[in-house]
């Protein structure tokens, strides 16, 4: 490492999509009367609509709301667009679907990667994600992933990619932007982090960023990875 380089001290991880396979949990919870191919498409569109809802609130400078409420509203939008499936989802089923987002498994390689970053590289690892603290507590327990701290948009009072969301988390852990790597499967997130001076690593997940041009994303950030198998090595290099 050259004298000009700043030593990395911590990693901020986005959570859903980046570390967790939300798609598997949601599709499994959809009624069996919906064909699995259709269930997958419905889940992907639901996730897409969730990001649209979040972006609208962000652009209107609205305070973060409970993610369960955002997901419920997004689900209604999607069901209105797919009336054939709407009849399969009564009120109880919809509540169960919202709860499915609270029990997502980690992608297979994630636990090993995070353990290596923490133990082999000696870095602190944090969740830095939109959502609620209750959701993040449920997800860490279900997935078995271990972090130093969970920073939610609810806790920080701001949605990513608001610069204040990154800056407040940095202030709380007393680190400078150049000492932190932001790892995410969402280009909008990394764009916000990069503007604040954080190092960026993009993790490509087929479930997320469906509207992004991956040929452009590959050239946009510090590192582009297909999964987290090589994440500790890449962090060590940057």
Image (cartoon, rainbow, N blue to C red):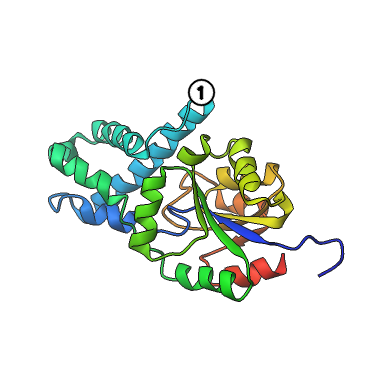
Q: Does any portion of residue 101 appear in the rendered image?
A: yes
Q: In this rendering, would 27 be left or right of 229?
A: left
Question: Relative to the observer, which residue lies in front, 210 or 161?
Answer: 161
> From the viewer's perspective, is residue 128 above or below residue 10?
above
Q: Residue at x 31, y 51 (%)?
A: 102
Instruction: Quickly name the residue at label 1.
Output: 60
The x and y percentages for residue 193 are 64, 45
Figure quadrant of the N terminus: bottom right
Question: Relative to the observer, which residue lies in front, 80 or 227?
Answer: 227
> From the viewer's perspective, is residue 112 above or below residue 45?
below
The x and y percentages for residue 90 are 13, 38
Figure quadrant of the C terminus: bottom right
Q: Residue at x 64, y 57 (%)?
A: 181
Q: Residues within 10 Å of mark 1 (few under 14, many from 20)?
A: few
The x and y percentages for residue 27 are 26, 54
Q: Does any portion of residue 230 appear in the rendered image?
A: no
Q: Residue at x 49, y 61 (%)?
A: 147
């Amino acid at each position: 490492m050259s004298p000009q380089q700043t030593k990395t001290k911590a990693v901020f991880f986005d959570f859903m999509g980046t570390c967790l396979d939300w798609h598997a949990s949601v599709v499994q919870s959809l009624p069996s009367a919906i064909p699995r191919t259709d269930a997958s498409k419905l889940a992907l569109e639901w996730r897409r609509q969730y990001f649209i809802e979040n972006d609208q609130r962000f652009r209107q400078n609205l305070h973060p709301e409970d993610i369960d409420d955002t997901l419920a509203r997004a689900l209604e939008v999607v069901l209105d667009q797919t009336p054939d499936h709407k009849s399969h989802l009564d009120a109880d089923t919809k509540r169960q679907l919202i709860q499915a987002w609270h029990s997502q498994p980690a992608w297979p390689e994630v636990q090993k990667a995070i353990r290596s970053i923490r133990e082999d590289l000696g870095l602190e690892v944090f969740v830095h994600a939109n959502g609620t603290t209750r959701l993040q507590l449920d997800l860490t327990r279900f997935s078995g992933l271990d972090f130093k701290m969970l920073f939610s948009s609810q806790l920080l009072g701001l949605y990513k990619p608001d610069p204040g969301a990154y800056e407040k988390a940095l202030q709380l852990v007393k680190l400078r932007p150049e000492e932190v790597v932001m790892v995410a499967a969402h280009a909008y997130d990394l764009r916000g982090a990069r503007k604040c001076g954080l190092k960026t690593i993009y993790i490509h997940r087929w479930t997320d960023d469906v509207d992004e041009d991956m040929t452009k994303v590959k050239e946009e950030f510090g590192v582009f990875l297909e999964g987290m198998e090589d994440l500790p090595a890449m962090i060590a290099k940057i």
